[in-house]
Amino acid sequence: MTIETSPESGPPEAAVTDGTTTTSPTTTEAEPATTLVGTGGEWWRSAVIYQIYPRSFSDSDGDGIGDLPGITARLTALSELGVDAVWLSPFMTSPQHDAGYDVADYCDVDPLFGTLEDFDRLLATAHGLGIRVIVDLVPNHTSWDHAWFREALAAAPGSPERARYMFRDGKGPNGDEMPNNWESVFGGPAWERTTNPDGTPGQWYLHLFDKSQPDLDWENPWVRERFREILRFWLDRGVDGFRVDVAHGLIKEAGLPDYTPPADAGSMGGGVVPVGLEPGIDSDAELDPPTPPYWAQDGVHEIYRDWHDLLAEYEGDRVLCAEAWVEPLTKLARWVRPDEMHQAFNFTYLSAGWSAPELRVVIDTSIAAFSSVGAPSTWVLSNHDVVRHASRLALGADNLQGAGIGPKSPGLPDPVVGLRRARAATSLMLALPGSAYVYQGEELGLPEDIYLPDEARQDPTWFRTHHEKYGRDGCRVPIPWEPQVPSYGFGLEGTSASWLPQPDDWDRFARASQEGVAGSTLELYKLALRLRAERQLGTGVLEWLPGYGENVIAFRNNGVTVIANMGETAVELPVETTPDGILLMSEALTEAALPPDTAIWLA
Ligand code: NOJ
Protein backbone atom coordinates (compact mmCIF):
# COMPACT_ATOMS: atom_id res chain seq x y z
CA MET A 1 0.00 0.00 0.00
CA THR A 2 1.39 3.40 -0.90
CA ILE A 3 0.33 6.99 -0.60
CA GLU A 4 0.25 8.71 -3.94
CA THR A 5 1.54 12.24 -4.09
CA SER A 6 0.57 14.47 -6.96
CA PRO A 7 3.70 15.52 -8.86
CA GLU A 8 2.32 18.91 -9.88
CA SER A 9 2.25 20.60 -6.56
CA GLY A 10 2.97 24.26 -7.08
CA PRO A 11 3.51 26.86 -4.38
CA PRO A 12 0.29 27.83 -2.64
CA GLU A 13 -1.29 31.08 -3.64
CA ALA A 14 -1.10 34.02 -1.30
CA ALA A 15 -3.11 32.72 1.57
CA VAL A 16 -5.47 34.91 3.53
CA THR A 17 -3.98 34.79 6.95
CA ASP A 18 -5.34 37.76 8.84
CA GLY A 19 -8.96 36.77 8.44
CA THR A 20 -9.97 40.15 7.06
CA THR A 21 -8.68 40.45 3.52
CA THR A 22 -9.93 38.17 0.82
CA THR A 23 -8.35 37.14 -2.43
CA SER A 24 -10.12 35.62 -5.39
CA PRO A 25 -8.82 32.11 -5.22
CA THR A 26 -8.88 29.97 -8.28
CA THR A 27 -9.43 26.28 -8.18
CA THR A 28 -6.70 25.42 -10.63
CA GLU A 29 -3.74 24.85 -8.33
CA ALA A 30 -3.77 22.00 -5.90
CA GLU A 31 -1.55 20.94 -3.05
CA PRO A 32 -0.33 17.35 -2.94
CA ALA A 33 -3.17 14.89 -2.90
CA THR A 34 -3.29 11.87 -0.69
CA THR A 35 -5.25 8.88 -1.74
CA LEU A 36 -5.46 5.19 -1.33
CA VAL A 37 -3.86 3.05 -3.95
CA GLY A 38 -4.83 -0.54 -4.56
CA THR A 39 -7.91 -0.87 -2.39
CA GLY A 40 -10.78 -3.18 -3.15
CA GLY A 41 -14.30 -2.23 -4.06
CA GLU A 42 -16.07 -3.45 -0.94
CA TRP A 43 -19.23 -1.54 -0.14
CA TRP A 44 -18.08 -0.45 3.31
CA ARG A 45 -15.11 1.48 2.00
CA SER A 46 -17.31 4.37 0.95
CA ALA A 47 -20.61 3.64 2.71
CA VAL A 48 -22.72 6.08 4.69
CA ILE A 49 -23.87 4.15 7.74
CA TYR A 50 -26.77 5.44 9.82
CA GLN A 51 -26.74 4.63 13.51
CA ILE A 52 -30.10 3.60 14.91
CA TYR A 53 -30.36 3.76 18.67
CA PRO A 54 -33.34 1.39 18.89
CA ARG A 55 -34.85 2.63 22.13
CA SER A 56 -35.15 6.15 20.73
CA PHE A 57 -36.00 5.64 17.06
CA SER A 58 -39.60 4.50 16.71
CA ASP A 59 -41.97 2.83 19.16
CA SER A 60 -44.57 0.45 17.72
CA ASP A 61 -46.20 -0.78 20.94
CA GLY A 62 -46.64 2.41 22.93
CA ASP A 63 -44.44 1.48 25.90
CA GLY A 64 -42.27 4.55 25.37
CA ILE A 65 -39.26 2.52 24.21
CA GLY A 66 -38.46 2.17 20.54
CA ASP A 67 -38.45 -1.35 19.11
CA LEU A 68 -37.63 -3.46 16.07
CA PRO A 69 -41.09 -3.34 14.44
CA GLY A 70 -40.95 0.43 14.91
CA ILE A 71 -37.67 0.53 13.01
CA THR A 72 -39.01 -1.68 10.23
CA ALA A 73 -42.01 0.60 9.83
CA ARG A 74 -39.74 3.61 9.37
CA LEU A 75 -37.06 2.16 7.11
CA THR A 76 -38.40 3.81 3.99
CA ALA A 77 -37.51 7.18 5.55
CA LEU A 78 -33.89 6.01 5.69
CA SER A 79 -34.03 4.78 2.15
CA GLU A 80 -35.29 8.23 1.10
CA LEU A 81 -32.51 9.81 3.12
CA GLY A 82 -30.07 7.82 1.00
CA VAL A 83 -27.99 5.84 3.49
CA ASP A 84 -26.22 2.62 2.51
CA ALA A 85 -26.45 0.77 5.80
CA VAL A 86 -27.76 0.98 9.33
CA TRP A 87 -25.95 0.06 12.52
CA LEU A 88 -28.31 -1.00 15.30
CA SER A 89 -27.16 -0.36 18.87
CA PRO A 90 -27.86 -3.44 21.05
CA PHE A 91 -31.36 -4.89 21.11
CA MET A 92 -30.37 -8.24 22.63
CA THR A 93 -31.68 -9.58 25.93
CA SER A 94 -30.55 -7.23 28.68
CA PRO A 95 -31.63 -5.80 32.03
CA GLN A 96 -30.83 -2.40 30.45
CA HIS A 97 -28.56 -1.07 33.17
CA ASP A 98 -26.46 0.47 30.39
CA ALA A 99 -29.18 0.78 27.75
CA GLY A 100 -28.50 -2.67 26.31
CA TYR A 101 -24.68 -2.57 26.42
CA ASP A 102 -25.10 -5.09 29.23
CA VAL A 103 -26.10 -8.24 27.36
CA ALA A 104 -27.68 -11.19 29.14
CA ASP A 105 -28.22 -13.30 26.00
CA TYR A 106 -26.30 -12.51 22.84
CA CYS A 107 -28.52 -14.68 20.66
CA ASP A 108 -31.97 -13.39 21.45
CA VAL A 109 -33.93 -10.16 21.24
CA ASP A 110 -35.00 -8.44 24.43
CA PRO A 111 -38.83 -8.48 24.71
CA LEU A 112 -38.63 -4.67 25.03
CA PHE A 113 -37.53 -4.58 21.41
CA GLY A 114 -39.44 -7.55 20.00
CA THR A 115 -38.47 -11.03 18.90
CA LEU A 116 -35.99 -12.76 16.63
CA GLU A 117 -38.76 -12.94 14.03
CA ASP A 118 -39.09 -9.16 14.26
CA PHE A 119 -35.37 -8.92 13.65
CA ASP A 120 -35.62 -11.19 10.59
CA ARG A 121 -38.42 -9.01 9.21
CA LEU A 122 -36.35 -5.88 9.81
CA LEU A 123 -33.38 -7.43 8.04
CA ALA A 124 -35.42 -8.59 5.08
CA THR A 125 -37.14 -5.21 4.74
CA ALA A 126 -33.84 -3.36 4.92
CA HIS A 127 -32.24 -5.65 2.36
CA GLY A 128 -35.28 -5.21 0.14
CA LEU A 129 -34.64 -1.46 0.24
CA GLY A 130 -30.95 -1.95 -0.51
CA ILE A 131 -29.90 -1.07 3.04
CA ARG A 132 -27.33 -3.26 4.79
CA VAL A 133 -27.61 -4.03 8.49
CA ILE A 134 -24.80 -4.02 11.03
CA VAL A 135 -25.45 -5.16 14.60
CA ASP A 136 -23.65 -4.25 17.79
CA LEU A 137 -21.45 -6.85 19.45
CA VAL A 138 -20.45 -6.30 23.08
CA PRO A 139 -17.54 -8.65 23.82
CA ASN A 140 -15.66 -6.87 26.62
CA HIS A 141 -18.29 -7.58 29.26
CA THR A 142 -21.63 -9.27 29.72
CA SER A 143 -24.51 -8.34 31.95
CA TRP A 144 -24.41 -9.65 35.49
CA ASP A 145 -27.67 -11.35 34.49
CA HIS A 146 -25.92 -13.48 31.86
CA ALA A 147 -26.07 -17.19 32.69
CA TRP A 148 -22.26 -17.34 32.36
CA PHE A 149 -21.87 -14.85 35.18
CA ARG A 150 -24.57 -16.32 37.38
CA GLU A 151 -22.88 -19.70 37.06
CA ALA A 152 -19.54 -18.09 37.85
CA LEU A 153 -20.92 -16.50 41.01
CA ALA A 154 -22.41 -19.82 42.10
CA ALA A 155 -19.13 -21.67 41.47
CA ALA A 156 -16.09 -21.70 43.72
CA PRO A 157 -13.02 -19.48 43.31
CA GLY A 158 -10.62 -21.16 40.90
CA SER A 159 -13.42 -22.96 39.03
CA PRO A 160 -13.70 -22.95 35.22
CA GLU A 161 -16.88 -20.89 35.56
CA ARG A 162 -15.05 -18.14 37.46
CA ALA A 163 -12.26 -18.25 34.84
CA ARG A 164 -14.68 -16.82 32.28
CA TYR A 165 -14.46 -13.45 34.06
CA MET A 166 -11.85 -11.39 35.88
CA PHE A 167 -12.34 -12.61 39.45
CA ARG A 168 -9.50 -11.86 41.88
CA ASP A 169 -8.89 -12.17 45.60
CA GLY A 170 -8.80 -8.86 47.42
CA LYS A 171 -5.64 -7.46 48.96
CA GLY A 172 -4.99 -7.04 52.66
CA PRO A 173 -5.27 -9.58 55.47
CA ASN A 174 -9.00 -10.12 54.99
CA GLY A 175 -9.03 -9.57 51.26
CA ASP A 176 -11.14 -6.48 51.73
CA GLU A 177 -8.99 -4.15 49.65
CA MET A 178 -9.57 -4.02 45.93
CA PRO A 179 -7.17 -6.08 43.78
CA ASN A 180 -5.85 -2.86 42.18
CA ASN A 181 -6.69 0.83 41.89
CA TRP A 182 -8.49 0.82 38.53
CA GLU A 183 -11.46 3.11 38.11
CA SER A 184 -14.65 2.44 36.20
CA VAL A 185 -15.16 4.46 33.02
CA PHE A 186 -18.49 5.52 34.49
CA GLY A 187 -16.93 6.67 37.77
CA GLY A 188 -16.05 4.95 41.03
CA PRO A 189 -13.98 1.79 41.48
CA ALA A 190 -13.73 -0.86 38.75
CA TRP A 191 -14.06 -3.72 41.26
CA GLU A 192 -17.09 -5.13 43.04
CA ARG A 193 -16.88 -7.61 45.88
CA THR A 194 -18.97 -10.77 45.79
CA THR A 195 -20.69 -12.46 48.70
CA ASN A 196 -20.12 -16.14 49.37
CA PRO A 197 -23.09 -18.52 49.74
CA ASP A 198 -22.55 -18.45 53.53
CA GLY A 199 -22.86 -14.66 53.56
CA THR A 200 -19.15 -13.93 54.06
CA PRO A 201 -17.39 -11.49 51.71
CA GLY A 202 -15.86 -13.25 48.72
CA GLN A 203 -13.70 -12.49 45.69
CA TRP A 204 -13.85 -9.32 43.65
CA TYR A 205 -14.70 -9.03 39.95
CA LEU A 206 -13.54 -6.43 37.47
CA HIS A 207 -16.01 -4.16 35.69
CA LEU A 208 -14.46 -1.41 33.58
CA PHE A 209 -17.97 0.00 33.16
CA ASP A 210 -20.97 -0.40 35.49
CA LYS A 211 -20.89 -3.05 38.20
CA SER A 212 -23.68 -4.75 36.27
CA GLN A 213 -21.17 -5.26 33.40
CA PRO A 214 -18.51 -7.79 34.54
CA ASP A 215 -15.47 -8.00 32.24
CA LEU A 216 -14.87 -11.30 30.49
CA ASP A 217 -11.41 -12.88 30.54
CA TRP A 218 -10.40 -12.97 26.89
CA GLU A 219 -7.24 -14.95 27.66
CA ASN A 220 -9.63 -17.85 28.22
CA PRO A 221 -10.16 -19.97 25.04
CA TRP A 222 -13.66 -20.84 26.28
CA VAL A 223 -14.69 -17.19 25.94
CA ARG A 224 -13.20 -16.98 22.45
CA GLU A 225 -15.13 -20.03 21.32
CA ARG A 226 -18.44 -18.68 22.65
CA PHE A 227 -17.99 -15.47 20.68
CA ARG A 228 -17.21 -17.35 17.48
CA GLU A 229 -20.60 -19.01 17.97
CA ILE A 230 -22.26 -15.65 18.53
CA LEU A 231 -20.71 -14.17 15.39
CA ARG A 232 -21.92 -17.16 13.38
CA PHE A 233 -25.40 -16.90 14.88
CA TRP A 234 -25.89 -13.40 13.47
CA LEU A 235 -23.95 -14.01 10.24
CA ASP A 236 -26.09 -17.04 9.52
CA ARG A 237 -29.15 -14.84 10.02
CA GLY A 238 -27.80 -12.57 7.31
CA VAL A 239 -26.36 -9.53 9.05
CA ASP A 240 -23.82 -7.55 7.07
CA GLY A 241 -21.41 -6.98 9.90
CA PHE A 242 -20.71 -5.91 13.46
CA ARG A 243 -19.86 -2.73 15.26
CA VAL A 244 -17.57 -4.02 18.00
CA ASP A 245 -18.01 -2.33 21.36
CA VAL A 246 -14.89 -1.40 23.38
CA ALA A 247 -12.66 -3.08 20.79
CA HIS A 248 -9.59 -1.73 22.58
CA GLY A 249 -10.43 -3.26 25.96
CA LEU A 250 -10.65 -7.03 25.73
CA ILE A 251 -7.12 -7.86 26.88
CA LYS A 252 -5.71 -6.54 30.13
CA GLU A 253 -2.01 -6.26 30.97
CA ALA A 254 -0.71 -9.33 32.81
CA GLY A 255 -0.62 -8.82 36.55
CA LEU A 256 -3.24 -6.05 36.36
CA PRO A 257 -0.84 -3.32 37.53
CA ASP A 258 -2.15 -0.20 39.26
CA TYR A 259 -2.84 2.75 36.96
CA THR A 260 -4.04 6.27 37.56
CA PRO A 261 -5.50 7.91 34.44
CA PRO A 262 -4.77 11.55 33.66
CA ALA A 263 -7.42 13.95 34.93
CA ASP A 264 -8.46 14.87 31.39
CA ALA A 265 -8.96 11.32 30.13
CA GLY A 266 -12.25 10.93 28.28
CA SER A 267 -14.65 8.23 29.33
CA MET A 268 -14.37 5.50 26.71
CA GLY A 269 -10.76 6.36 26.00
CA GLY A 270 -8.66 6.99 29.02
CA GLY A 271 -5.56 7.16 26.88
CA VAL A 272 -6.59 9.56 24.16
CA VAL A 273 -3.94 12.14 23.36
CA PRO A 274 -4.78 15.29 21.44
CA VAL A 275 -3.73 15.51 17.83
CA GLY A 276 -0.99 18.07 17.35
CA LEU A 277 -1.24 20.80 14.78
CA GLU A 278 1.69 19.42 12.83
CA PRO A 279 1.06 16.46 10.57
CA GLY A 280 3.40 13.55 10.85
CA ILE A 281 4.43 11.35 13.67
CA ASP A 282 8.08 11.77 14.42
CA SER A 283 8.89 9.73 17.44
CA ASP A 284 8.26 6.23 18.63
CA ALA A 285 6.65 7.61 21.75
CA GLU A 286 4.04 9.40 19.67
CA LEU A 287 3.53 6.34 17.54
CA ASP A 288 2.99 4.13 20.52
CA PRO A 289 2.30 6.26 23.58
CA PRO A 290 1.91 4.49 26.90
CA THR A 291 -1.59 3.17 27.34
CA PRO A 292 -3.52 2.21 30.45
CA PRO A 293 -3.10 -1.50 31.30
CA TYR A 294 -6.69 -2.12 30.27
CA TRP A 295 -6.76 -0.38 26.86
CA ALA A 296 -5.10 -1.08 23.53
CA GLN A 297 -3.05 -4.07 24.62
CA ASP A 298 -1.34 -5.89 21.76
CA GLY A 299 -3.17 -9.11 22.56
CA VAL A 300 -6.45 -7.84 21.14
CA HIS A 301 -5.19 -8.13 17.59
CA GLU A 302 -5.10 -11.91 17.39
CA ILE A 303 -8.78 -11.94 18.38
CA TYR A 304 -9.66 -9.69 15.45
CA ARG A 305 -7.53 -11.72 13.06
CA ASP A 306 -9.53 -14.75 14.12
CA TRP A 307 -12.82 -12.91 13.54
CA HIS A 308 -11.59 -11.60 10.19
CA ASP A 309 -11.07 -15.15 9.00
CA LEU A 310 -14.44 -16.20 10.33
CA LEU A 311 -16.24 -13.38 8.48
CA ALA A 312 -14.29 -14.17 5.32
CA GLU A 313 -16.01 -17.56 5.22
CA TYR A 314 -19.25 -15.72 4.46
CA GLU A 315 -20.22 -14.14 1.17
CA GLY A 316 -20.96 -10.49 0.70
CA ASP A 317 -18.15 -8.44 2.25
CA ARG A 318 -19.27 -8.63 5.86
CA VAL A 319 -17.69 -5.91 7.94
CA LEU A 320 -16.20 -5.42 11.40
CA CYS A 321 -16.05 -1.87 12.70
CA ALA A 322 -14.02 -1.16 15.83
CA GLU A 323 -15.22 1.16 18.53
CA ALA A 324 -11.72 1.81 19.84
CA TRP A 325 -10.89 5.07 21.57
CA VAL A 326 -7.23 4.81 20.62
CA GLU A 327 -4.86 7.57 19.60
CA PRO A 328 -2.77 8.46 17.75
CA LEU A 329 -4.42 7.40 14.52
CA THR A 330 -1.24 5.58 13.51
CA LYS A 331 -1.88 3.26 16.41
CA LEU A 332 -5.60 2.93 15.72
CA ALA A 333 -4.67 1.86 12.18
CA ARG A 334 -3.46 -1.42 13.67
CA TRP A 335 -7.10 -2.35 14.28
CA VAL A 336 -7.73 -2.22 10.52
CA ARG A 337 -4.68 -3.97 9.13
CA PRO A 338 -5.62 -6.13 6.13
CA ASP A 339 -6.21 -9.23 8.26
CA GLU A 340 -8.02 -7.56 11.18
CA MET A 341 -11.12 -5.38 11.28
CA HIS A 342 -12.27 -3.44 8.25
CA GLN A 343 -13.13 -0.10 9.77
CA ALA A 344 -12.54 1.80 12.99
CA PHE A 345 -14.45 4.84 14.17
CA ASN A 346 -12.36 7.97 13.73
CA PHE A 347 -12.88 9.55 17.13
CA THR A 348 -9.94 11.86 16.55
CA TYR A 349 -12.05 13.49 13.84
CA LEU A 350 -15.10 13.60 16.12
CA SER A 351 -13.02 15.15 18.91
CA ALA A 352 -11.56 17.93 16.74
CA GLY A 353 -12.66 21.47 17.54
CA TRP A 354 -14.26 23.96 15.17
CA SER A 355 -10.89 24.87 13.77
CA ALA A 356 -9.72 24.62 10.18
CA PRO A 357 -6.02 24.19 11.03
CA GLU A 358 -6.83 21.38 13.42
CA LEU A 359 -9.21 19.66 11.02
CA ARG A 360 -6.78 19.87 8.11
CA VAL A 361 -4.22 18.00 10.17
CA VAL A 362 -6.75 15.43 11.37
CA ILE A 363 -7.98 14.77 7.84
CA ASP A 364 -4.45 14.41 6.47
CA THR A 365 -3.35 12.25 9.36
CA SER A 366 -6.44 10.07 9.07
CA ILE A 367 -6.07 9.41 5.37
CA ALA A 368 -2.36 8.74 5.74
CA ALA A 369 -2.72 6.46 8.76
CA PHE A 370 -5.56 4.35 7.40
CA SER A 371 -4.13 4.29 3.87
CA SER A 372 -0.87 2.92 5.21
CA VAL A 373 -2.71 -0.32 6.02
CA GLY A 374 -5.07 -0.28 3.03
CA ALA A 375 -8.16 0.75 4.99
CA PRO A 376 -10.55 3.62 4.27
CA SER A 377 -10.79 6.39 6.79
CA THR A 378 -14.10 6.72 8.55
CA TRP A 379 -15.66 10.03 9.58
CA VAL A 380 -18.13 10.61 12.38
CA LEU A 381 -19.47 13.63 14.23
CA SER A 382 -22.09 12.26 16.61
CA ASN A 383 -23.18 9.07 18.32
CA HIS A 384 -25.07 7.94 21.43
CA ASP A 385 -22.06 8.58 23.72
CA VAL A 386 -21.16 12.18 22.92
CA VAL A 387 -22.79 15.60 22.98
CA ARG A 388 -24.65 16.02 19.67
CA HIS A 389 -22.53 18.04 17.26
CA ALA A 390 -25.25 20.67 16.77
CA SER A 391 -24.43 21.62 20.37
CA ARG A 392 -20.87 20.44 20.80
CA LEU A 393 -19.45 22.60 18.01
CA ALA A 394 -20.61 25.76 19.81
CA LEU A 395 -19.61 24.80 23.34
CA GLY A 396 -17.70 27.49 25.15
CA ALA A 397 -15.87 25.06 27.43
CA ASP A 398 -14.17 21.72 27.11
CA ASN A 399 -16.44 18.76 27.58
CA LEU A 400 -14.94 15.36 28.00
CA GLN A 401 -16.39 12.72 25.75
CA GLY A 402 -19.11 10.92 27.67
CA ALA A 403 -19.44 13.59 30.37
CA GLY A 404 -22.47 15.24 28.77
CA ILE A 405 -23.86 18.71 29.40
CA GLY A 406 -26.69 19.99 31.55
CA PRO A 407 -28.10 23.25 32.87
CA LYS A 408 -25.12 23.88 35.16
CA SER A 409 -22.39 23.08 32.64
CA PRO A 410 -19.97 25.88 31.76
CA GLY A 411 -19.98 27.43 28.28
CA LEU A 412 -23.42 26.29 27.18
CA PRO A 413 -23.80 26.54 23.39
CA ASP A 414 -25.68 29.12 21.39
CA PRO A 415 -28.13 26.85 19.53
CA VAL A 416 -28.16 29.00 16.39
CA VAL A 417 -24.39 28.97 16.06
CA GLY A 418 -24.35 25.26 16.93
CA LEU A 419 -26.80 24.28 14.21
CA ARG A 420 -25.09 26.45 11.65
CA ARG A 421 -21.73 24.86 12.40
CA ALA A 422 -23.23 21.38 12.47
CA ARG A 423 -24.69 21.85 8.98
CA ALA A 424 -21.34 23.08 7.70
CA ALA A 425 -19.45 20.31 9.49
CA THR A 426 -21.70 17.63 8.03
CA SER A 427 -21.49 19.14 4.56
CA LEU A 428 -17.72 18.92 4.86
CA MET A 429 -17.73 15.41 6.31
CA LEU A 430 -19.99 13.94 3.65
CA ALA A 431 -17.67 15.21 0.93
CA LEU A 432 -14.64 13.35 2.30
CA PRO A 433 -13.41 10.10 0.75
CA GLY A 434 -14.00 7.07 2.94
CA SER A 435 -16.98 5.91 4.96
CA ALA A 436 -19.17 8.20 7.07
CA TYR A 437 -21.35 7.48 10.08
CA VAL A 438 -24.50 9.50 10.77
CA TYR A 439 -26.30 9.30 14.12
CA GLN A 440 -30.10 9.26 14.16
CA GLY A 441 -31.53 12.75 14.59
CA GLU A 442 -28.53 14.65 13.31
CA GLU A 443 -30.22 14.78 9.90
CA LEU A 444 -32.93 16.76 11.69
CA GLY A 445 -30.41 19.15 13.23
CA LEU A 446 -31.26 17.93 16.72
CA PRO A 447 -29.31 19.60 19.50
CA GLU A 448 -28.32 17.98 22.77
CA ASP A 449 -31.21 18.08 25.22
CA ILE A 450 -29.48 20.11 27.89
CA TYR A 451 -32.52 20.64 30.10
CA LEU A 452 -33.59 17.06 30.75
CA PRO A 453 -35.00 16.97 34.28
CA ASP A 454 -32.52 15.42 36.70
CA GLU A 455 -35.04 12.80 37.77
CA ALA A 456 -35.35 11.59 34.17
CA ARG A 457 -31.66 10.89 33.68
CA GLN A 458 -30.73 7.22 33.38
CA ASP A 459 -27.09 7.02 32.31
CA PRO A 460 -24.98 5.09 34.86
CA THR A 461 -22.43 7.92 34.58
CA TRP A 462 -24.94 10.27 36.23
CA PHE A 463 -25.34 7.96 39.20
CA ARG A 464 -21.78 6.67 39.54
CA THR A 465 -20.36 10.22 39.57
CA HIS A 466 -22.99 11.29 42.13
CA HIS A 467 -24.46 13.70 39.57
CA GLU A 468 -21.14 15.37 38.89
CA LYS A 469 -21.28 14.32 35.21
CA TYR A 470 -24.60 14.58 33.41
CA GLY A 471 -23.76 11.66 31.14
CA ARG A 472 -25.16 10.78 27.76
CA ASP A 473 -28.95 10.96 28.07
CA GLY A 474 -29.08 14.35 26.34
CA CYS A 475 -28.15 12.82 22.98
CA ARG A 476 -30.49 9.84 23.39
CA VAL A 477 -33.90 11.50 23.58
CA PRO A 478 -36.43 9.84 21.22
CA ILE A 479 -36.39 11.55 17.86
CA PRO A 480 -39.30 13.62 16.48
CA TRP A 481 -41.11 12.46 13.35
CA GLU A 482 -44.18 14.67 13.17
CA PRO A 483 -45.09 18.03 14.69
CA GLN A 484 -48.03 18.59 16.99
CA VAL A 485 -48.80 14.97 17.77
CA PRO A 486 -48.07 13.03 20.97
CA SER A 487 -44.36 12.14 21.33
CA TYR A 488 -43.80 13.83 17.96
CA GLY A 489 -44.85 10.57 16.33
CA PHE A 490 -42.16 8.52 18.10
CA GLY A 491 -45.04 6.36 19.31
CA LEU A 492 -46.41 5.03 16.05
CA GLU A 493 -49.94 4.62 17.38
CA GLY A 494 -50.20 8.19 18.62
CA THR A 495 -48.99 7.31 22.10
CA SER A 496 -47.29 9.94 24.20
CA ALA A 497 -44.91 7.77 26.25
CA SER A 498 -41.21 8.35 25.76
CA TRP A 499 -38.53 6.81 28.00
CA LEU A 500 -36.75 10.16 28.17
CA PRO A 501 -39.02 13.21 28.01
CA GLN A 502 -38.85 15.16 24.76
CA PRO A 503 -38.49 18.96 24.84
CA ASP A 504 -41.62 21.02 24.20
CA ASP A 505 -40.12 22.93 21.30
CA TRP A 506 -39.16 20.14 18.91
CA ASP A 507 -41.99 20.65 16.38
CA ARG A 508 -39.57 22.45 14.12
CA PHE A 509 -37.11 19.57 14.19
CA ALA A 510 -39.70 16.91 13.31
CA ARG A 511 -38.97 15.07 10.09
CA ALA A 512 -42.36 15.96 8.61
CA SER A 513 -41.75 19.65 9.34
CA GLN A 514 -38.59 19.53 7.23
CA GLU A 515 -39.60 17.15 4.45
CA GLY A 516 -39.55 19.00 1.13
CA VAL A 517 -38.71 22.32 2.80
CA ALA A 518 -35.89 23.98 0.89
CA GLY A 519 -32.96 24.71 3.15
CA SER A 520 -34.07 22.41 5.96
CA THR A 521 -31.41 20.28 7.59
CA LEU A 522 -33.15 17.12 6.41
CA GLU A 523 -33.09 18.32 2.79
CA LEU A 524 -29.45 19.33 3.17
CA TYR A 525 -28.56 15.78 4.27
CA LYS A 526 -30.59 14.25 1.45
CA LEU A 527 -28.93 16.44 -1.12
CA ALA A 528 -25.46 15.76 0.28
CA LEU A 529 -26.05 12.02 0.28
CA ARG A 530 -27.45 12.02 -3.24
CA LEU A 531 -24.57 14.07 -4.62
CA ARG A 532 -22.04 12.04 -2.66
CA ALA A 533 -23.34 8.89 -4.30
CA GLU A 534 -23.68 10.40 -7.80
CA ARG A 535 -20.20 11.93 -7.73
CA GLN A 536 -18.67 8.93 -5.95
CA LEU A 537 -17.08 11.11 -3.32
CA GLY A 538 -16.65 8.15 -0.97
CA THR A 539 -14.10 6.59 -3.30
CA GLY A 540 -12.56 9.85 -4.46
CA VAL A 541 -9.22 11.52 -3.92
CA LEU A 542 -8.80 14.55 -1.71
CA GLU A 543 -6.72 17.42 -3.04
CA TRP A 544 -6.23 20.44 -0.83
CA LEU A 545 -6.91 23.79 -2.46
CA PRO A 546 -4.65 26.60 -1.32
CA GLY A 547 -5.38 30.29 -1.15
CA TYR A 548 -8.45 30.47 1.03
CA GLY A 549 -6.76 31.33 4.28
CA GLU A 550 -5.94 29.73 7.57
CA ASN A 551 -9.51 29.40 8.78
CA VAL A 552 -10.94 27.80 5.69
CA ILE A 553 -10.98 24.16 4.65
CA ALA A 554 -10.90 23.86 0.88
CA PHE A 555 -10.39 20.75 -1.17
CA ARG A 556 -11.42 19.02 -4.32
CA ASN A 557 -12.75 15.47 -4.51
CA ASN A 558 -13.78 13.82 -7.78
CA GLY A 559 -14.38 17.16 -9.47
CA VAL A 560 -16.31 18.71 -6.60
CA THR A 561 -14.80 21.73 -4.86
CA VAL A 562 -15.64 21.90 -1.17
CA ILE A 563 -15.07 25.04 0.87
CA ALA A 564 -15.91 25.39 4.56
CA ASN A 565 -15.43 28.71 6.28
CA MET A 566 -14.65 28.27 9.97
CA GLY A 567 -13.39 31.81 10.45
CA GLU A 568 -15.17 34.96 11.50
CA THR A 569 -15.27 36.82 8.20
CA ALA A 570 -16.78 36.02 4.83
CA VAL A 571 -14.58 34.37 2.23
CA GLU A 572 -14.71 35.24 -1.43
CA LEU A 573 -15.71 32.37 -3.69
CA PRO A 574 -13.66 31.40 -6.75
CA VAL A 575 -14.08 34.01 -9.50
CA GLU A 576 -15.56 31.46 -11.87
CA THR A 577 -18.42 30.54 -9.50
CA THR A 578 -21.85 30.84 -11.08
CA PRO A 579 -25.20 30.07 -9.45
CA ASP A 580 -25.44 26.99 -11.66
CA GLY A 581 -22.12 25.73 -10.36
CA ILE A 582 -23.32 25.64 -6.76
CA LEU A 583 -24.20 22.07 -5.89
CA LEU A 584 -24.88 22.49 -2.19
CA MET A 585 -24.76 25.23 0.43
CA SER A 586 -25.10 24.71 4.15
CA GLU A 587 -26.57 28.24 4.40
CA ALA A 588 -27.94 30.74 1.93
CA LEU A 589 -25.22 32.99 0.52
CA THR A 590 -25.07 36.72 0.95
CA GLU A 591 -23.50 38.11 -2.21
CA ALA A 592 -20.64 36.22 -3.78
CA ALA A 593 -19.00 35.37 -0.50
CA LEU A 594 -19.12 32.41 1.84
CA PRO A 595 -20.25 33.58 5.30
CA PRO A 596 -18.67 32.30 8.52
CA ASP A 597 -19.67 28.80 9.65
CA THR A 598 -20.81 27.82 6.17
CA ALA A 599 -19.78 25.15 3.70
CA ILE A 600 -20.39 24.96 -0.04
CA TRP A 601 -19.90 22.38 -2.80
CA LEU A 602 -19.12 23.66 -6.28
CA ALA A 603 -19.14 21.76 -9.55
C1 NOJ B 1 -19.37 1.94 24.32
C2 NOJ B 1 -20.82 2.17 24.05
O1 NOJ B 1 -20.96 2.96 22.92
C3 NOJ B 1 -21.39 2.79 25.29
O2 NOJ B 1 -22.68 3.28 25.09
C4 NOJ B 1 -21.35 1.79 26.40
O3 NOJ B 1 -21.79 2.39 27.59
C5 NOJ B 1 -19.92 1.29 26.61
N1 NOJ B 1 -19.26 0.98 25.39
C6 NOJ B 1 -19.92 0.04 27.46
O4 NOJ B 1 -20.44 -1.03 26.74
Image (tube, helix red, strand yellow):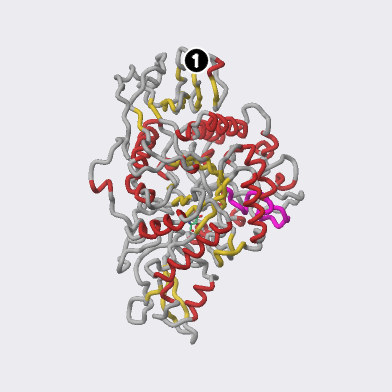
Q: Is mark 1 within 8 Å of ligand 1?
A: no
Q: Is residue 67 magenta?
A: yes
Examine the rendered structure and indicate whether residue 258 appears above or below residue 147.
Answer: above
Which residue range is magenta in the image? Answer: 52-70
Of helix, strand and loop, which one carries label 1?
loop
Left or right? Give the position of 227 relative to 80: left
| Residue assigned mark 1 | 577
Can residue 397 be seen here?
Answer: no
Q: Residue at x 76, y 49 (%)?
A: 494
For the residue carrying disc 1, how many other residues have a C-alpha within 10 Å: few (<14), some (14-19), or many (20+)? few
Examine the rendered structure and indicate whether residue 338 appears above or below residue 461.
Answer: above
Q: Is residue 528 magenta?
A: no
Q: Residue at x 50, y 26 (%)?
A: 598
The residue lying toward the viewer, choosing from 335 and 587, is 335
Left or right? Give the position of 55 relative to 560: right
Where residue 86 sits in the image (x, y, percent)? 57, 47
Where residue 379 sits in the image (x, y, percent)? 46, 40
Where residue 539 sits in the image (x, y, percent)? 45, 34
Can residue 371 be seen here?
Answer: yes
Secondary structure mostly taken by the magenta-highlighted segment of the chain: loop
The residue furthest left is 283
Q: Amino acid at mark 1?
A: Thr
Where residue 43 sits in the image (x, y, percent)? 50, 42
Left or right? Give the position of 406 relative to 488: left
The residue lying toward the viewer, choosing from 318 and 398, is 318
